[in-house]
Image (tube, helix red, strand yellow):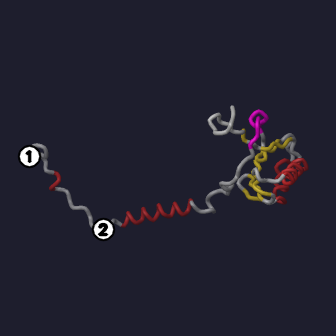
Amino acid sequence: MITRPLDLSSRLRAAPRNFDVLFYVNVGLIAFMFVLFGSRFVLSPGLGVDFKVPTMDGALGAAVPTDVVIAVKGSDLAFVEGAKVDSAGLRRWLIGRAQGRPGLRLLVQADASLSTKDLTDIYEMAREAGFAAVQIAAEPREPASAEAPGKQP
């Protein structure tokens, strides 16, 4: 036949009926990597999906560069450089971080549900540690859409 001059299909060997051992090794390694990288020992701790930074008008206008960033979820839960600390640990960490470096500014990424008392305690810890300024992270408010029912532009 002119379309198949070498008749290569007749010279091919049949596909094996069982899987090769290397196939099982590859599947095992891939499964091991998924288990390993999904482990809490490999991934750094993070904030839960319900963490929300407060919103306010003019949030971007008052923003200044900061030297140190902490994330505070609750009164006794803060994340600093990938480590989870309580309020006593946060106080020690702030003192150690600001020691010998005057003029550092601290950015506090506080959850919107954090109480004013807890936020004031963090301010006081930062002041005692020697930070020059403390700034609270905030997102700008979303502009109200004119298409929303019941709202006047």
Q: Main secondary structure of the magenta part?
A: loop
Q: Position of residue 32 (x, y in %)?
A: 50, 64
Residue 116 as seen in the image, left or right of residue 73: right
Question: Image point 12% across, 45% down: which residue?
Answer: 5
Q: Secondary structure at mark 1?
A: loop
Q: Secondary structure at mark 2?
A: loop
Residue 131 as seen in the image, left or right of residue 74: right
Residue numbers of the magenta segment: 55-65
Is 20 or 51 nearer to us in this picture?
A: 51
Q: Quadrant of residue 103?
A: top right
Label 2 and label 1: CA atoms lie apart by 34 Å
Is 136 or 33 nearer to us in this picture?
A: 136
As drawn, 131 above or below 143: below
- Residue under label 1: 1
- Residue under label 2: 18
Neighbour tally class for label 1: few under 14, some 14-19, many 20 plus, Cα within 10 Å: few
Whether the magenta-drawn stretch holds residue 30 is answered as no
